Amino acid sequence: MNITSYEVEKIKDPTGIIAGDRYEFLLGFEVPEDDELFEEASSLDLRVILAVLDTESKIVQYHFLDRKDGKVLDYGLEESEESVVLAFCVEHYSEVE
């Protein structure tokens, strides 16, 4: 997975369920031809919620979204892809502060 574009925003957690700060990412990405998402990838985004507490960061939620209608699609990331997304988000979340 190659991330080609992104937007990041710090979000408030009015419930206090997740400790620390939360950040919402909207990621555009390229998908290899041999991936099951390849056919749809040009019209998909990945929405990621990152929780940051002190020096620990983790993805607490993510969804693939259809750009055309915002519909959530039932796909998951492979473990290696999730690691790439986490590393990207950790590198970029501080841009909003």
Image (cartoon, rainbow, N blue to C red):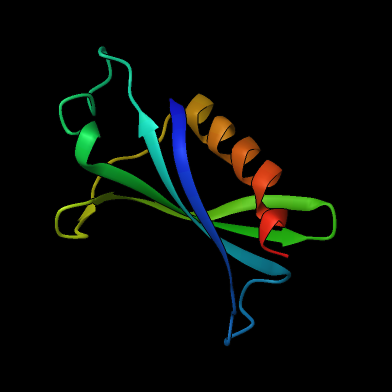
Q: Position of residue 3 (x, y in %)?
A: 46, 32
Residue at left 35%, top 39%? 76
Q: Position of residue 27 (x, y in %)?
A: 43, 45
Q: Position of residue 89 (x, y in %)?
A: 61, 45
Relative to the observer, which residue lies in front, 94 or 54?
A: 94
Residue at left 38%, top 33%? 29
Judge whether 62 appears above or below 39 on screen: below
The residue at the far right in this view is 54
Image quadrant of residue 95?
bottom right
The residue at the far top in this view is 34
Relative to the observer, which residue lies in front, 6 or 62?
A: 6
Q: Position of residue 47 (x, y in %)?
A: 41, 53
Image quadrant of residue 8?
bottom right
Judge whether 10 appears above or below 59 on screen: below
Is 9 placed left or right of 33 in the picture? right
Q: Count the marks.
A: 0
Judge whether 75 appears above or below 26 on screen: above
Image quadrant of residue 30?
top left
Residue at left 22%, top 24%? 38
Q: Looking at the figure, which quarter contains the N terminus?
A: top left
Q: Looking at the figure, which quarter contains the C terminus?
A: bottom right
Residue at left 64%, top 50%? 58
Is 33 placed left or right of 81 in the picture? left
